[in-house]
Amino acid sequence: MTVEHRPDSERRPSPLSAVPEEIPGHGLLAGRKVVVTAAAGTGIGFATARRALLEGADVVVSDWHERRLGETADKLRAEFGDQTVAQVVCNVQETSAVNALIDAAAGELGRIDILVNNAGLGGETPLVDMDDDEWDRVIDITLGGTFRATRAALRYFRDAPHGGVVVNNASVLGWRAQHSQSHYAAAKAGVMALTRCAAIEAAEYGVRINAVAPSIARHPFLAKVTSEELLEDLASREAYGRAAEVWEIAATIAMLASDYTTYLTGEVVSISSQRA
């Protein structure tokens, strides 16, 4: 049998190429206490905090940018006035600040059930043009920040009378090659390895650790660090011919944080409409 492959220009649009409406909350995280790093602004972190609230959780949002963090918290409070939305400024490059975040979140919420590690930094620089400072900064924020926050959370969960969940934000670039992304890809591959190894250690504390690996999710901050041409090209390669909405990423994070995935740990879930 001969299988005919149409060129991209002749392919019919997928029924899933249209952007779907955001799904309502279903109480997946009702009563849970959630901490989200790098939640200020309009990206995946904000969408994750909002999804946690939609699913019934109380939330601490954290970011290094104090003004944007305050605006984010105010926006969430305006929408979810009956739920707790607290804010804690934190630079994930500083161990003392990360430890203080976990302590402050536990104090604000009464306890912590879920940590979402969203902090990360990218950019477009060919390896031959990259200096040590840029490499170190991307690795330290993206991988080092995830390490520091996960460590602080595990120390909290180890001594708490309940288990917990950690969800890390990785990237399909931990698997795929992309020009000018060696620092970011190396950091995200490290997040994946950290997720797997930490999950084995965390099991004895009743803690699950998983990660998501989005391909491309469009939001204003991404447009500041990535060219429009590259974003359009990456989106066009997806099976649906579009980038993900940030709420689609956040919904998967909420699923991993919920009791629908109680036997899942040490895994990286690709959020992509093409092969990882």
Image (spheres, rainbow, N blue to C red):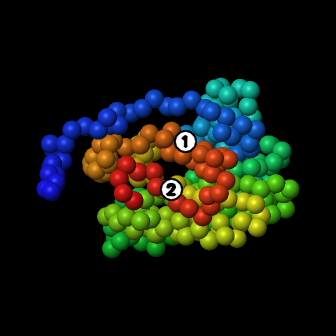
Q: How many marks?
A: 2
In the image, residue 73 above or below residue 122: above
Q: Residues within 10 Å of mark 1 (few under 14, many from 20)?
A: many
The kind of residue on which mark 1 rests is Ala
Furthest toward the front, the residue is 1
Label 2: how many residues lie within 10 Å, few (<14), some (14-19) or many (20+)? some
Circle 2 SS class: strand
In the rendered view, does 8 fall on the left or right side of 218?
Answer: left
Amino acid under disc 2: Val
Find residue 265 and report its image quarter.
bottom right
Look at 77% across and 49% down and name the residue there: 112
Is any part of residue 234 visible from this angle?
A: yes
Which quadrant of the figure contains the C terminus? bottom left
Could you give the CA–CA distance between mark 2 and mark 1, rounded to whole angstroms?
12 Å
Q: Which mark is residue 269?
A: 2
Q: Name the residue rendered at 75%, 35% in the picture.
A: 84
Question: In the rendering, at what x and y percent does residue 273 appear?
Answer: 37, 49
Direction from residue 52 to residue 108 in the image, left or right: right
Q: Residue at x 74, y 49 (%)?
A: 113
Name the residue tied to disc 1: 251
Would you identify the image quadrant in which residue 129 lies? Answer: bottom left
- Is residue 140 among the parts visible in the rendering? no
